[in-house]
């Protein structure tokens, strides 16, 4: 599972799956023992949960980097290299 960003103890990953297919464009965010799948379009929690502050940081970061997230999702589908994305400052 490639790590594409990390900030404020939050780690952002995109999973490789057998066949390279994810049917909903999303990424994964983990913070301590909490984890969530976050949809890219629309930006929404699909599964799991994060503490309120961590979720706020993740959604702010994702809104700023939506094009890069979409490009990385395409990279998963095509099984190409994924790009790191700047952390939230």
Image (spheres, rainbow, N blue to C red):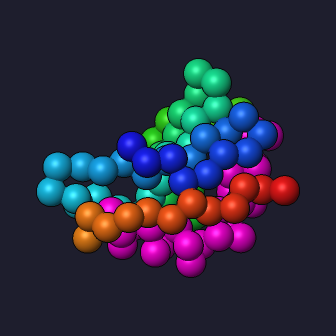
Tell me: residue 10, above or below residue 66.
above
Q: Is residue 44 left or right of residue 37?
A: right
Q: Residue at x 47, y 73 (%)?
A: 70
Q: 89 or 35, which lies in front?
A: 89
Question: Magenta region: which residues?
Answer: 52-76
Name the spot of residue 60 as percent of width and height, x first.
75, 60
Q: Residue at x 28, y 58 (%)?
A: 22
Q: 76 or 36, which lies in front?
A: 76
* Quadrant in which the C terminus appears: bottom right
Name the spot of residue 11 as percent of width and height, x first.
61, 41
Q: Residue at x 77, y 56 (%)?
A: 88
Q: Does 54 appear in magenta?
A: yes
The residue sitting at the top extreme is 33
Observer able to see residue 38 = no
The residue sitting at the bottom extreme is 67
Principal SS element in the magenta part? helix
Q: How many marks?
A: 0
The residue sitting at the front extreme is 81
The residue sitting at the right extreme is 89
Q: Is residue 42 left or right of residue 10?
A: left
Q: Residue at x 31, y 67 (%)?
A: 80
Name the spot of residue 13 as percent of width and height, x first.
49, 47
Name the spot of residue 57 as percent of width and height, x first.
76, 50
Observer able to see residue 2 = yes
Q: Does 56 appear in magenta?
A: yes
Q: Is residue 38 left or right of residue 65?
A: left
* Quadrant in which the N terminus appears: top left
The quadrant in which residue 50 appears is: top right
């Amino acid at each position: 599972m490639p790590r594409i960003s990390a900030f404020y103890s939050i780690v952002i990953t995109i999973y490789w799956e057998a066949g390279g297919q994810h049917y909903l464009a999303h990424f994964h965010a983990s913070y301590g023992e909490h984890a969530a799948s976050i949809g890219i379009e629309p930006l929404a929690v699909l599964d799991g949960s994060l503490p309120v502050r961590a979720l706020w940081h993740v959604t702010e970061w994702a809104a700023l980097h939506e094009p890069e997230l979409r490009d990385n999702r395409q990279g998963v589908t095509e099984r190409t290299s994924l790009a790191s994305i700047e952390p939230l400052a």
